Image: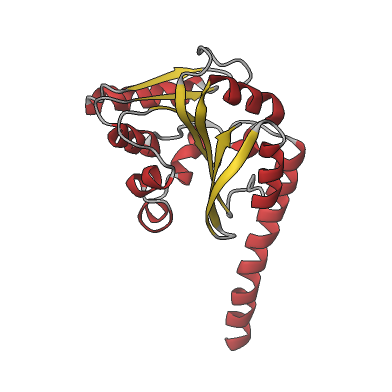
Amino acid sequence: MSEWIFAVCCGVPLAIIALHTTVRLARHFSKFPIPQALTQLIDHPLRRKFIQPPDKTAIRHGIRPGMCVLEVGPGTGTYTLAAARRVGPEGKVVAIDIEPKIIERLNRRIRAEGVVNLEARVADVYDLPFDDGIFDLIFMITVIGEIPDVPRALAEFHRVLKPDGRLVFSELFPDPDYPLANALTRRVESEGFRLKEKIGNFFYYTLIFKKT
Protein backbone atom coordinates (compact mmCIF):
# COMPACT_ATOMS: atom_id res chain seq x y z
CA MET A 1 0.00 0.00 0.00
CA SER A 2 2.80 2.42 0.92
CA GLU A 3 4.47 1.78 -2.44
CA TRP A 4 1.20 2.50 -4.22
CA ILE A 5 0.75 5.77 -2.31
CA PHE A 6 4.35 6.74 -3.08
CA ALA A 7 3.82 6.01 -6.77
CA VAL A 8 0.66 8.14 -6.85
CA CYS A 9 2.29 11.01 -4.95
CA CYS A 10 5.19 11.03 -7.39
CA GLY A 11 3.24 10.22 -10.52
CA VAL A 12 0.53 12.88 -10.29
CA PRO A 13 2.90 15.88 -10.05
CA LEU A 14 5.05 14.46 -12.84
CA ALA A 15 1.98 13.95 -15.02
CA ILE A 16 0.87 17.54 -14.39
CA ILE A 17 4.34 18.86 -15.24
CA ALA A 18 4.47 16.75 -18.40
CA LEU A 19 1.01 17.95 -19.50
CA HIS A 20 1.89 21.59 -18.77
CA THR A 21 5.16 21.28 -20.72
CA THR A 22 3.39 19.65 -23.67
CA VAL A 23 0.74 22.38 -23.80
CA ARG A 24 3.40 25.11 -23.57
CA LEU A 25 5.29 23.59 -26.48
CA ALA A 26 2.13 23.33 -28.55
CA ARG A 27 1.19 26.93 -27.77
CA HIS A 28 4.71 28.10 -28.61
CA PHE A 29 4.29 26.96 -32.19
CA SER A 30 0.58 27.73 -32.55
CA LYS A 31 -0.76 30.97 -31.08
CA PHE A 32 -4.53 31.38 -30.99
CA PRO A 33 -7.11 33.08 -28.73
CA ILE A 34 -8.50 30.95 -25.93
CA PRO A 35 -11.88 29.39 -26.87
CA GLN A 36 -14.91 30.85 -25.12
CA ALA A 37 -15.71 27.50 -23.49
CA LEU A 38 -12.39 27.44 -21.61
CA THR A 39 -12.67 30.88 -20.02
CA GLN A 40 -14.88 29.49 -17.23
CA LEU A 41 -12.09 27.09 -16.22
CA ILE A 42 -9.60 29.93 -15.95
CA ASP A 43 -11.94 32.15 -13.92
CA HIS A 44 -11.62 29.89 -10.87
CA PRO A 45 -12.91 31.02 -7.41
CA LEU A 46 -9.53 30.23 -5.81
CA ARG A 47 -7.82 32.49 -8.30
CA ARG A 48 -10.24 35.32 -7.61
CA LYS A 49 -9.94 34.93 -3.84
CA PHE A 50 -6.26 34.29 -3.23
CA ILE A 51 -4.18 35.13 -6.31
CA GLN A 52 -5.92 37.83 -8.33
CA PRO A 53 -8.80 39.40 -6.39
CA PRO A 54 -10.59 41.47 -9.06
CA ASP A 55 -10.95 44.77 -7.17
CA LYS A 56 -7.40 44.61 -5.80
CA THR A 57 -6.11 43.75 -9.27
CA ALA A 58 -7.75 46.89 -10.69
CA ILE A 59 -5.94 48.97 -8.06
CA ARG A 60 -2.71 47.08 -8.68
CA HIS A 61 -2.99 47.94 -12.38
CA GLY A 62 -3.10 51.63 -11.55
CA ILE A 63 -6.69 52.13 -12.66
CA ARG A 64 -8.12 55.30 -11.10
CA PRO A 65 -11.52 57.03 -11.03
CA GLY A 66 -12.30 58.95 -14.19
CA MET A 67 -9.95 57.02 -16.46
CA CYS A 68 -10.73 55.77 -19.95
CA VAL A 69 -9.50 52.17 -19.94
CA LEU A 70 -9.18 49.45 -22.58
CA GLU A 71 -9.09 45.76 -21.66
CA VAL A 72 -7.88 43.21 -24.20
CA GLY A 73 -9.30 39.72 -23.74
CA PRO A 74 -11.96 40.08 -21.01
CA GLY A 75 -12.73 36.37 -20.59
CA THR A 76 -15.78 36.04 -18.33
CA GLY A 77 -15.71 39.77 -17.52
CA THR A 78 -14.90 39.44 -13.82
CA TYR A 79 -11.89 41.76 -14.03
CA THR A 80 -13.62 43.95 -16.59
CA LEU A 81 -16.43 44.71 -14.16
CA ALA A 82 -13.91 45.40 -11.38
CA ALA A 83 -12.20 47.92 -13.66
CA ALA A 84 -15.57 49.56 -14.39
CA ARG A 85 -16.27 49.87 -10.67
CA ARG A 86 -12.85 51.39 -10.18
CA VAL A 87 -13.15 54.10 -12.87
CA GLY A 88 -16.55 55.08 -11.52
CA PRO A 89 -19.34 57.02 -13.24
CA GLU A 90 -16.95 59.62 -14.65
CA GLY A 91 -14.77 56.99 -16.32
CA LYS A 92 -15.26 54.37 -19.00
CA VAL A 93 -14.01 50.84 -19.74
CA VAL A 94 -13.98 49.29 -23.20
CA ALA A 95 -13.38 45.53 -23.48
CA ILE A 96 -12.42 43.92 -26.77
CA ASP A 97 -11.97 40.36 -27.98
CA ILE A 98 -11.67 38.73 -31.37
CA GLU A 99 -14.07 35.94 -30.29
CA PRO A 100 -17.72 37.06 -30.78
CA LYS A 101 -19.09 34.56 -28.24
CA ILE A 102 -16.97 36.07 -25.47
CA ILE A 103 -18.29 39.53 -26.28
CA GLU A 104 -21.88 38.29 -26.52
CA ARG A 105 -21.62 36.70 -23.08
CA LEU A 106 -20.03 39.81 -21.57
CA ASN A 107 -22.72 42.06 -23.06
CA ARG A 108 -25.39 39.85 -21.48
CA ARG A 109 -23.65 40.24 -18.14
CA ILE A 110 -23.37 44.01 -18.60
CA ARG A 111 -27.11 44.28 -19.27
CA ALA A 112 -28.02 41.95 -16.41
CA GLU A 113 -25.95 43.95 -13.91
CA GLY A 114 -26.97 47.34 -15.28
CA VAL A 115 -23.42 48.59 -15.86
CA VAL A 116 -23.47 51.87 -17.80
CA ASN A 117 -19.77 52.80 -18.02
CA LEU A 118 -18.66 49.60 -19.78
CA GLU A 119 -18.70 48.74 -23.48
CA ALA A 120 -17.80 45.36 -24.97
CA ARG A 121 -17.13 44.89 -28.67
CA VAL A 122 -15.48 42.54 -31.13
CA ALA A 123 -12.18 43.98 -32.37
CA ASP A 124 -8.80 42.96 -33.74
CA VAL A 125 -5.70 44.10 -31.82
CA TYR A 126 -3.93 44.63 -35.15
CA ASP A 127 -6.52 47.20 -36.25
CA LEU A 128 -8.14 48.81 -33.22
CA PRO A 129 -11.33 50.76 -34.08
CA PHE A 130 -10.35 53.77 -31.97
CA ASP A 131 -8.87 57.21 -32.57
CA ASP A 132 -5.30 58.02 -31.62
CA GLY A 133 -4.50 58.84 -28.01
CA ILE A 134 -7.85 58.25 -26.31
CA PHE A 135 -7.03 55.72 -23.57
CA ASP A 136 -5.36 56.44 -20.24
CA LEU A 137 -4.56 52.79 -19.66
CA ILE A 138 -4.65 49.44 -21.46
CA PHE A 139 -4.52 46.20 -19.51
CA MET A 140 -4.59 42.49 -20.24
CA ILE A 141 -4.44 39.48 -17.95
CA THR A 142 -2.74 36.32 -19.30
CA VAL A 143 -3.49 37.43 -22.87
CA ILE A 144 -0.28 38.66 -24.53
CA GLY A 145 0.93 35.09 -25.13
CA GLU A 146 -2.13 34.40 -27.29
CA ILE A 147 -1.23 37.14 -29.78
CA PRO A 148 0.84 35.80 -32.71
CA ASP A 149 2.30 39.15 -33.89
CA VAL A 150 3.10 40.99 -30.67
CA PRO A 151 5.04 43.94 -32.21
CA ARG A 152 2.10 44.70 -34.50
CA ALA A 153 -0.32 44.68 -31.56
CA LEU A 154 2.03 46.82 -29.43
CA ALA A 155 2.15 49.41 -32.21
CA GLU A 156 -1.64 49.70 -32.07
CA PHE A 157 -1.62 49.92 -28.26
CA HIS A 158 0.96 52.71 -28.52
CA ARG A 159 -1.20 54.55 -31.05
CA VAL A 160 -4.43 54.59 -29.02
CA LEU A 161 -2.78 55.46 -25.68
CA LYS A 162 -2.52 59.04 -24.52
CA PRO A 163 1.01 60.55 -24.40
CA ASP A 164 1.37 59.61 -20.72
CA GLY A 165 -0.68 56.41 -21.03
CA ARG A 166 0.07 53.12 -19.32
CA LEU A 167 0.21 49.58 -20.73
CA VAL A 168 -0.25 46.85 -18.10
CA PHE A 169 0.29 43.09 -18.22
CA SER A 170 -0.52 40.58 -15.49
CA GLU A 171 0.75 37.02 -15.91
CA LEU A 172 0.22 33.81 -13.95
CA PHE A 173 2.66 30.88 -14.10
CA PRO A 174 0.18 28.00 -14.67
CA ASP A 175 -0.96 29.72 -17.87
CA PRO A 176 0.53 27.74 -20.80
CA ASP A 177 1.37 31.05 -22.53
CA TYR A 178 3.16 32.45 -19.46
CA PRO A 179 6.13 34.64 -20.55
CA LEU A 180 9.13 35.36 -18.34
CA ALA A 181 8.97 38.92 -17.03
CA ASN A 182 12.41 39.88 -18.35
CA ALA A 183 11.61 38.56 -21.82
CA LEU A 184 8.28 40.40 -21.92
CA THR A 185 9.92 43.60 -20.70
CA ARG A 186 12.53 43.51 -23.48
CA ARG A 187 9.85 42.86 -26.06
CA VAL A 188 7.59 45.71 -24.94
CA GLU A 189 10.39 48.23 -24.43
CA SER A 190 11.57 47.63 -27.99
CA GLU A 191 8.22 48.97 -29.23
CA GLY A 192 8.11 52.43 -27.66
CA PHE A 193 7.40 51.76 -23.98
CA ARG A 194 9.43 52.01 -20.79
CA LEU A 195 8.97 49.82 -17.72
CA LYS A 196 7.63 51.95 -14.89
CA GLU A 197 6.96 49.31 -12.23
CA LYS A 198 7.11 45.57 -11.64
CA ILE A 199 4.95 44.01 -8.92
CA GLY A 200 4.87 40.40 -7.76
CA ASN A 201 7.12 37.40 -8.14
CA PHE A 202 7.99 34.60 -10.55
CA PHE A 203 4.61 32.88 -10.22
CA TYR A 204 2.42 35.98 -10.53
CA TYR A 205 3.60 39.37 -11.70
CA THR A 206 2.32 42.68 -13.05
CA LEU A 207 4.33 44.89 -15.38
CA ILE A 208 3.34 48.54 -15.82
CA PHE A 209 4.80 50.35 -18.83
CA LYS A 210 4.68 54.01 -19.76
CA LYS A 211 4.29 55.16 -23.33
CA THR A 212 7.42 56.95 -24.59
110, 198: nearer the viewer? 198
Q: Quadrant of residue 86?
A: top left
Q: Where's residue 38, x and y in %?
A: 51, 38
Tell me where residue 181 appears, x and y as whole percent.
64, 51
Q: Which quadrant would the C terminus be assigned to in this image?
A: top right
Q: Nearer the viewer, residue 187 or 100?
A: 187
Way the structure is coloured: secondary structure
The image quarter containing residue 14 is: bottom right
Q: Name the outermost residue toward the bottom.
A: 2
Q: Residue furthest right?
A: 29
Locate residue 202: give its quadrant: bottom right
Residue in the picture at 41% in, 48% down: 60
Q: Nearer the viewer, residue 104 or 207?
A: 207
- Horizontal and vertical percent position of residue 57: 40, 47
Residue 138 drawn at (x, y percent)? 49, 31
Is 168 positioned to the left or the right of 112 in the image? right
